[in-house]
Image (cartoon, rainbow, N blue to C red):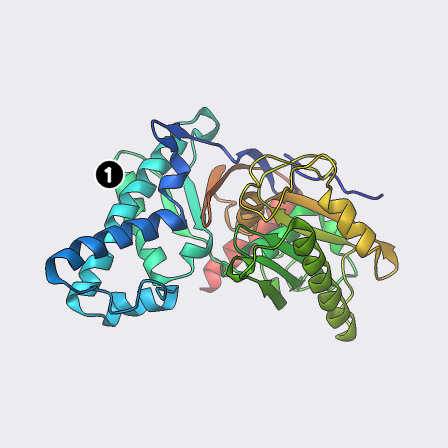
Amino acid sequence: MLIHASGMSTLPLVHVDTYSEELRGENGFLGDRANRKAFHTILDDWRDRIHAIVEEDPMGPGARSKLTKKRLDRTLTEGSTLAAGVLHTAIEEFAQELAEVTIRFLELESWQHTERIVVGGGLRGSRVGEVMIGRASILVKQAGHRVRMDPIRHDPDEAALIGATQLLPTSAFRGKDAMLAVDIGGSNIRAGVVDLAFDEDPDLTSCRVVALDRWRYADEKRRPTREMAVERLIRMLEQLKQGAEADGRALVSTIGVACPGSIMPDGFIRGGAQNLPGNWTSPKFNLAERLQRAIPKLGKQATRVLLHNDAVVQGLGEAPFMRDIPHWAILTIGTGLGNARFTNRATKRGARASEGTTRRRQAA
């Protein structure tokens, strides 16, 4: 089997200093205070408090199971004063939790001298999430940390797919048009075709997702098994491969995969994958091997599968835009709170990325 070394610390643009740090407090993991479930718990608590006073749900009747990101955004801008007030209160409380957790990360030795933090994950994909990030950033600064916090620039559904391109050296893209990439999360599995635009921008800052398949397995009436999830992923990749080839796109021979947990060089997953359906950390299960067996070739070349932690891969999409600072990090707010910290490498590819970023800023 041709398993390209997974979970690498040294990548084309960055060194991965640490990822999946588990901070503990008196009541368990601190990351549990700043994930998607924590925000909705805070919001529901404030709704219940106000409901007990005014005898009606401030977010509207029957809203409990319908609070999508779009509905929350509308409430923020168009909702009643009471509903908007409750939402603002929940945003403030969650931002305080996020700021406290962020400060704890910044106190870690492995996070020393971090200058910028990008925040990704599903919750970022809304105006409500952006306001949370902005408020947390102010609180972190107020605590004395000269750190900038920004929402990740790419759509949350696409960020890890785009980031997967930064797992490979430049030589992998010559003569190729696109790459298959996968993002496995605690609620969704996404697979896509990333157009490299390599001739336009060799630093990969212009790459974009041109085909996307998303399966939200958390909505299934019956939670799928690991085998069901893997088989579904294989079908998704096969369809995307066929579509790319029908469009005349020459695919990179490597599939990039973002997955929760600690990723071993041989492609096994160790710890941190408890939110996935079934046991993905079994010593008898190797996702890279399964995908290689199912899709043995891409074009005329044998398929390689390259795995890395999902927070790491989301962060990598920002790497070409971070060349002006040495140390930066990512937090991902989703089913859990993912994290990774990076140090930029001095490479020819990094120099080109820095030059490309400078040109774009001047053009803007």
Residue at x 68%, y 60% (from the top left corner): 232
Residue sitting at the far front: 222
Give the crowd class for mark 1: few <14, some 14-19, many >=20 residues within 10 Å. Answer: few
Left or right of residue 187: residue 23: left
Query: Is 66 placed left or right of 166 in the picture?
Result: left
- In the picture as drawn, the residue positioned furthest to the top comes out as 109
Say how many tags the image has: 1
Q: Is residue 348 left or right of residue 336?
A: right
Indicate the amino acid at tag 1: Gln
Residue 203 seen in this snapshot? no
Which residue occupies the foreground of this view, 29 or 155? 29
Q: Which residue is mark 1?
A: 142
Name the quadrant containing residue 109: top left
x and y, in percent, of residue 310 in the image: 57, 46
- If the image is split into quadrants, where does the C terminus sit? bottom left
Residue 256 location (% of width, % of height): 68, 51
Query: For the residue labelled by badge 1, is the local secondary structure a helix, a strand or a loop?
Result: helix
Q: Residue at x 40, y 40 (%)?
A: 32
Locate residue 114: give its quadrant.
top left
Which residue is at a point 68% across and 55% down the rendered structure image? 228
Give the x, y percent position of residue 328.
47, 40
Counting from the top left corner in percent of width and height, residue 168 is at: 70, 47
